[in-house]
Structure formats: C-alpha cells, structure tokens
Amino acid sequence: MQYAIFWGLLLGTFFLMEGAAWCIHRYVMHGFMWFWHKEHHQPPDRFLEKNDYFTLLFSIPSVLTLILGYEVAWLWFLKPIGYGILLYGLFYFVFHDLIVHRRIKFRFVAKNRYLRRIIRAHQAHHRCKDRKGAEAFGFLYALPRYDPED
Ligand SMILES: [Zn+2]
Ligand SMILES: [Zn+2]
C-alpha cells in the first residue's frame, strides 16, 4: 500500500510537471523571462546558454523537496514528489538537450512514433524565432498533428 502511494505521488508529480512546464514555457519563458530564453531560439553559438539558468532554477524544488522529505519524518510525502520532479528533469534533459538539440553528439535515430511526434513538435516550436507566435510548448505530450507522415 505504501508503495502504491509512493509511486502514485511520484508518477502524478511527473505528469503534472508537464503541465507546469507547458505554462512556464508559454507564459514565463516566452513572457517576462524571454531575455533568458531568447538565445535558445537563435542558432547556437556557444555550449552553455542563458536558457540553462532555467534548468538550474528548476532543480531547486526537486532538491528542497528531497531534503525535507528525508529530514522531516512527517514530510515523507515530499520524497516521491521530489523524485517525480527529478524524473521529469531527467526526461527533459535527455529528450530536449540530447535527442532534439544534440548538445552532445551521438548516433541515434528515433524510430518510435511517439518520440518522433514530440521531436517534430519541438522542432516546430523552434521554427519561430520570436517571443510571440510560437507553437507546441510542451515536451512530454504533443498534439496528433505533429505525428510523422509515414
Ligand atoms: Zn521556447
Ligand atoms: Zn529547444
């Protein structure tokens, strides 16, 4: 039973993070924090970009919830929440930074339909170089219209 609650909270947090990420990307990164995100919509000219500050910033809630979850007995439920945020962060890094943007060069061709759909959606997001007018702000989920044709 305890395992069920633990995994329920962990996976629930993981999927809720997609909603949070969508809102933050849509309204904060393409909003008043555009000055950090703008460089990510330009052709890359250096290894680290201002956009990486967001990655650092988003690791804070994960670290804090994990520390509190482990240190304070009655805050045990923060453990699976912290792991859920961490899992989403790892997914984001592997999908966004490695698979889509290839910040580290490696051989990989996506064959999986779901993976190809979310890759195409993020590529469509990058066709817009401006703060306004971009589409597909999510990472884990993309609309069926981004499905590959074949
Ligand atoms: Zn963007
Ligand atoms: Zn991107």
Image (tube, helix red, strand yellow):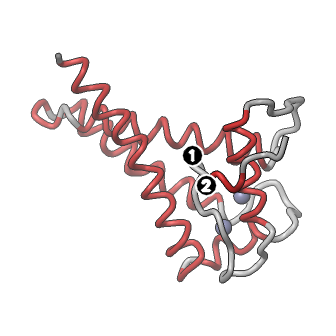
**Left or right of 100 on screen, residue 30:** left
- Within 8 Å of ligand 1, the CB of disc 2? no
Question: Up-down: is 22 above or below 144?
Answer: below
Q: Name the quarter where the N terminus is drawn.
A: top left
- For label 1, the residue is 140
The answer to which quarter of the image holds residue 71 is: top left
- For label 2, the residue is 143
Query: Gap between marks 2 and 1, in whole Å?
Result: 10 Å
Question: Up-down: is 134 above or below 79?
Answer: below
- Residue drawn at x 42%, y 40% is 14
Using the image as rendered, state which of residue 41 and residue 137 is in the foreground: 137
Q: Name the quarter where the C terminus is drawn.
A: top right
Q: Callout 2: helix, strand or loop?
A: loop
Residue type, numbered disc 2: Leu
Using the image as rendered, state which of residue 62 and residue 112 is in the foreground: 112
- Within 8 Å of ligand 2, the CB of disc 1? no
Ligand 2 position by quadrant: bottom right
- Residue drawn at x 31%, y 39% is 81
Question: Up-down: is 2 above or below 146?
Answer: above
- Residue drawn at x 29%, y 30% is 8
Q: Residues within 10 Å of mark 2 (few under 14, many from 20)?
A: few
Judged from this view, the residue extending furthest toward the front is: 150
Rendered location of residue 97, percent (x, y): 72, 46
**Tag of residue 67:** none
Residue type, numbered disc 1: Leu
